[in-house]
Amino acid sequence: MSSPSAPTSPDPGSTPPAPPVPLAALLARRDLGLRLLTGSGDVPLHWVHTSEMADPYPYLLGGELLMTAGVQLTDPAHYVERVVEAGAAALGFGVTPVYDTVPAELVEACARRGLPLVEVPPRTPFTAVARALWRLMAEARLQELRRVTEAQQSLAAAAARPAPVPAVLGALASRLAGRAVLFGADGTESTAAGREVPPEAARALRELAGVLGPRPGGGPASASGDGGGWRLAAYALGGGDGLTLGVATERRDPGDHTIAGVAVVLLSLLTAPHRGADVTVRDGALVRLLLGAAPEDVAAALGPGPWTVVHARGGDGTPFAATALAAALGTPLMDAGTGKGTGMRTATGTPPDTGTGATDAECAPGGAPAAAPSPVRLLLPASAPLTAQPGWTLGAAAPAHARDLPAADAEAARALRRAEASRTPLARHRPAGFAGLVDPAEAAAYARALLAPLAEPLTETLRVWLSLHGSWDRTAAALDVHRNTVRQRITRCTALLDRDLDDPDVRMELWFALRLG
């Protein structure tokens, strides 16, 4: 087994923003016409770099497809030696304008050092190769994000099953196409799922797990290594009992650590020593609720409540941003939205009201509204304190019992929209007040008649302008238009409505109409 090591954060200056792509994928692009002369097409490419330096070593980071036309190629053997020392993944040689063919000395040197050599035809510019690689990397990143998202959903569903620990281990092993083992504090195998591994790999995984666990002064939270030809990783659970998760896979993909991290969080919650049977049942019911079950199906397990539904949007874009938010708010009951139309649903099976009215800045090409990312949804005990969180915009519903959670979900969605419109970090649901005393149908009819002369975008401009207390600058920023445009629209509203918008009574009446119409 190789020496275990705790993962460290990669240097952002030397790490590409997407998974590497095998050279073979680039060779498969017929439009480029690339031809492999020596070496293997299995080497991973992190980026493309072009250099005509006689010695490119000082300018390489490693993992590149180095492109050159051989302008200063005087000693092919020494050149290849320096390229290999720099850690370049492959060499691409353009046969124009300096050479008509790839020099035989260069081919021999690359074959001798095991460096893949690619012939670039005259019709293919180096920039086309670089652009093709970045497109392949973008596609690979999208596929990896989709894989991680599906794995997170699978793990969350497994955590809600009657035997959650074996189910989570089984889901993890299935998603990683390997084996997942839960080790006790004494190193014994407690529960396992997935493929059988060679005895050498199983022994190495047990030894790796022994590196972690409780010890004086603490120890590493995770470790990785190799054994029996398998990639191994171990993660200490946070329950305090010294339990460790071990994972063995034949290969290691970029998203595997993220997927395993989700399993660690779930297993830490499921195996925490303070959890009683009633807590396990209740949390499982809440997770099922977050996954879309009707509230009446889980109301008995939820208890009397009340609960606070919170919608959040923001974060730093990392896979654990939503998990970190849930931890900061003190709840494991979280549904991280991954796209439009996903997440918690109401008792009727329809998504909760998320609102419309995208601004010009939120529109996709052609004028169609861009799909906003689904918010992160969380359930907190009503007694839990709720404060603004850095980098997030939160909308909180009024405390509600289990049977009323669908309505509370809609309240949280409206509160989040209000927070985003007013650019405040936290907005709470506000009761209807005097507006709630008016017959809804009668009020809506009156509002439609009052606002009939206005059409979009005048109605939306008036709504935002009133919500921001008549501030020209803040309204312009919220609508992403010039302040003079706001003034012109409000002047037009004044003329069409034949009302004095400086009169507070008029503003109040229009605000009620905009809310109830």
Image (cartoon, rainbow, N blue to C red):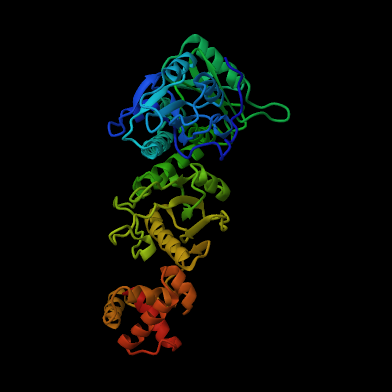
Q: Is residue 294 left or right of residue 223?
A: left
The one nearer the camera, 502 or 116, is 116
Q: Do we see residue 76 in this rendering?
A: yes
> Which corner quadrant of the image does residue 450 belong to?
bottom left
Residue 182 seen in render: no
Please tell me which residue lies in front, 512 or 341.
341
Q: Position of residue 217 (x, y in %)?
A: 73, 30
Residue 206: where, in percent of width, then height?
A: 56, 17
Q: Which residue lies most toward the top here?
A: 199
Residue 263 position within the rendered picture, expressed as x and y whole percent measured from the top left:
48, 33
Q: How many marks?
A: 0
Q: Quadrant of the C terminus?
A: bottom left
Q: Residue at x 51, y 51 (%)?
A: 315
Q: Residue at x 31, y 35 (%)?
A: 123
Answer with left or right where residue 98 lies relative to residue 267: left
Vertically, is 411 above or below 137? Answer: below
Residue 67, quarter of picture: top left
Whether residue 252 is situated above or below residue 330 in the rendered picture: above
